[in-house]
Amino acid sequence: MNSQVAGAASIGKPPVSFQQVGLHFGGNPVLEDVSLDIKSGDFLAILGPNGAGKTTLLKIALGLVSPTAGQAMLFGVPAARFRQRYRIGYVPQKAGVFGDFPATVWEVVTTGRVSRSGFLRPLSSKDRQIVAGVLHRLGLENLAARTVRLLSGGQRQRVAIARALAAEPEVLLLDEAAEGLDAPGEDAFYSLLAELNHEQGLTVVLVTHDIGAVSLRVRTVVCLNRRVVFTGSPQECLENGKLAALYGMPVFVPSKWASGREMQKSGLER
Amino acid sequence: MDIWHYGFFVRAMIAGVLCGALCPVVGVFLVARRFSFFADALAHVSLTGLALGLVLGIAPGITTVAAVVSAAFAVEWLRQRHRFYADALLAAVMAGGLALGVILVSKSRGFGADLTGYLFGSLLTIGPTDLWFTGVLFVIAVVVVIPLYKGLLAIALDEEYARAAGLPVVAINAVFITVAALTVAVAIRAVGVLLAGALIVIPVLVAVRVTRSFRGALFAAVVTGVALVVGGLHLSYALDLPSGPAVVLLGIVTLVGVSFYQQLVLRYR
């Protein structure tokens, strides 16, 4: 009920918005004047080379890092003061690790429910029902009693997404979450995100330096290199040589991802 | 005569069981967060607290708890600021606590005879006041940890995620390290400054080898902790051994035994 009221209050406000965000660390600029509105229902990739500030930007949105200039807004509320954290699901970098301590898939995923149900209340039957539903949705129901550390990388990645979805978020923020997956695992991972975006209307924002894996699947690409250097469709991004400018070298995207072309040589077409 | 007719043994057993149950509860969360040395470092700082009490003429129990709780908050603050050096910081705190403690001890008089008891524990000489102290701390820890379990689990599995999910991580951590510090103060009475860390960590190491869930590890660690204290005290009485080291050595033997058994099962299954 609360979320419906809160949702009504924030209708029309972008779920995530950066307003002239800047961050300096030890005198060095990490982010400069980043302004970006992420629309509800978008499937968006923030692309950029190592050190471009992608992860930092995500952490600013999550309220984990405070910018030195500007601010991030979540549903129209400054990130630092945003209390309805359950509306933002987070899949961190190396999310598949969860330490070496024994914990079952069920236990890990129920920790994701805490932001929705509160950490002091015991899990209600509704909470359990929702967690069970998420496990079923992600094909993890048979693994619920298994120890997470004994699962494969791809399965652990699904557990991390399940944990984020357990809070029934409206936005999913993923930080290099496909790192370490093999090609089929990566394919399954992006397919799952596309399904969640299409079928449930979940706003998906993923941060990655992996151009090929996202270029066909996402709706919007944001190229970041301390500043936003491009925002548009994947096709525009590939055709206008933006990637070459971003990475400072010609970028080759395998045909599988580049709308049927044999080999797209972004940046060499200028 | 049956040893259960001796008041000192009954008191030792009650205090030991409470301690054996409490220490692994804290230990599970410390080990999961790769922060096992925390307990050891605090135990060493307790010597400073103890000696301060003797030098200043204040009840050593009070100064010990004060020193351990202050050190716990100092270490947590340093850990938040210098995440990557957490283990080195703990080593420094541990050495510093011991060094300051020894210097203060050397300046106080009439402490020498008790030092062995503080360093290695003296469950068998525990008095009614200490028993009450242990009981009250046990109740406080249980009352605090049970409602915080969900939050502690989320933080233990992934602290950054817990922060992003809006959990009051700083507040939960503050409550937890206070409980951890009080637990160390209790453990010192049972197995002494030098072995308190062992009673907090060893039952957890045994438990993680035989369980696959966090809750299972917590339960198995508590059962192991209690069994080690009960077994250790009996050994101590039967073989005339110091009680603290008997408990800890029994723990090490159990850990090695369980590991060896698992290797055998894996090989011949």
Image (tube, grey):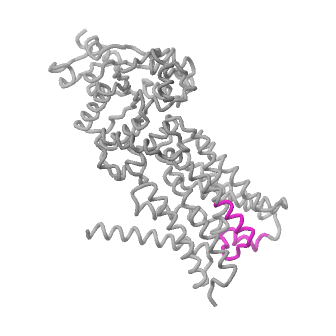
Identify the residue at image location x=49%, y=63%.
B221
Residue B54, position in %: x, y? 81, 63
In front here: B2 or A60?
B2
A123, above or below A11, in the image: below
Quadrant of residue B21 within the rendered picture: bottom right
Q: Residue furthest bottom?
A: B1
Q: Which residues are magenta?
A: B111-138
**Residue A109 found in image quarter:** top left
Is B229 contained in the magenta span? no
B239 versus A209 height, above or below: below
Q: Residue at x 34, y 24 (%)?
A: A201
Q: Position of residue A137 (x, y in %)?
A: 30, 38
Q: Is residue B224 left or right of residue A190?
A: right
Residue ID at (43%, 60%): B208
Q: For this rendering, which residue is in front, B138 or A90?
A: B138
Q: How many marks?
A: 0
Magenta span includes B137: yes
| Left or right of B23 on screen, residue A1 | left
Residue A166: image location, x then y, percent: 41, 38
Can you name the residue that lies furthest to the top here?
A270
The quadrant of the rendering that contains the C terminus of chain A is top left
Residue occupying the far right of the picture = B57
> Which percent across, then down, holds residue A180?
31, 39
Q: Is residue B254 above or below residue A192?
A: below
Q: Main secondary structure of the magenta part?
A: helix
Residue A256 picture quarter = top left
Residue drawn at 46 percent across, 24 percent down: A57
Left or right: B115 as drawn, with respect to A51: right
